[in-house]
Amino acid sequence: MTTTFRHTRGTNLGRKGVGATIIAELLDHTDTQNVKVYTENTADTVQYIDRVMGAEMGKLAQAFTGRIISNLNESERGHDPTSLITNNGIDTIGACGTNDFCITGYETCYLCPKFRPLVDGPHQQILNKLYEEKEERLKQTKSIDYASSKDRIILAVEYVVQACNDMKRTIGSH
């Protein structure tokens, strides 16, 4: 029981980015040589799991609840320029199906049921950018909690990327 508690405490401290010296002191170790088990691979493992499991988790989480469209005419507001959603004015990623005013930014659109992403939108690039930002936050802060703050958006974009790829394959096979 004591060993399990120590291991859990050490692992949780390592996940929060606490350094080896502090963990060793908190667990009454005389040096840091046995603390590596709590700190080793934590950040790398998270990044690896994100990359490998992201698409599968997106299916489970179903963070995206909108509807993918092939062209803007399929959205509720058609080509209404105020409905277009861009990634900071660069590319059109989709359309908004509501007239409500929203200032949250294009990334959170992926969580909105009124978002209509274009099947050919730059969703993979947006996903890549989100992963890069996550890795950078982790490097800078060593905080997995902070680095993971956009995980729900990442899952939603993963789902959109996969659904768009599936749609393209279906359209291509007809």
Image (cartoon, helix red, strand yellow):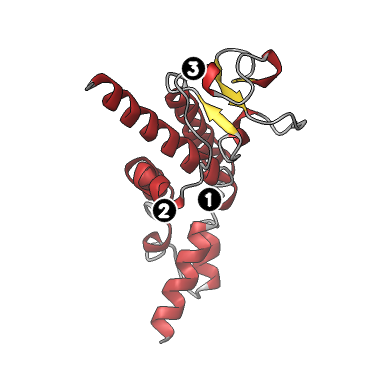
Can you give x and y, in whole percent of width and height, for residue 163 in the image? 38, 34
Q: Secondary structure at mark 1?
A: helix
Binning the other alpha carbons within 10 Å of mark 1 as few (below 14), some (14 to 19) or many (20 upward) gives many
Looking at marks 3 and 2 on the same chain, the residue that comes earlier in the sequence is marked by 2
Q: Are marks 3 and 1 in contact (CB under 8 Å)?
A: no
Q: Which residue is mark 1?
A: 144
Residue 127 or residue 110, whichever sits in front: 110
In the shown orientation, is residue 140 left or right of residue 70? right
Q: As shown in the figure, which amino acid type bears the numbered disc 3?
A: Asn
Binning the other alpha carbons within 10 Å of mark 3 as few (below 14), some (14 to 19) or many (20 upward) gives some
Q: Are marks 1 and 2 in contact (CB under 8 Å)?
A: yes
Q: As shown in the figure, which amino acid type bears the numbered disc 2?
A: Thr
| 125 vs 32: above or below | above
Residue 134 visible in image: yes
Q: Secondary structure at mark 2?
A: helix
Distance, label 1 to label 2, CA atoms, is 9 Å
Can you give x and y, in whole percent of width and height, for residue 31 in the image? 44, 66
Looking at marks 1 and 2 on the same chain, the residue that comes earlier in the sequence is marked by 2
Q: Which residue is mark 3?
A: 71
The image quadrant that residue 87 belongs to is: top right
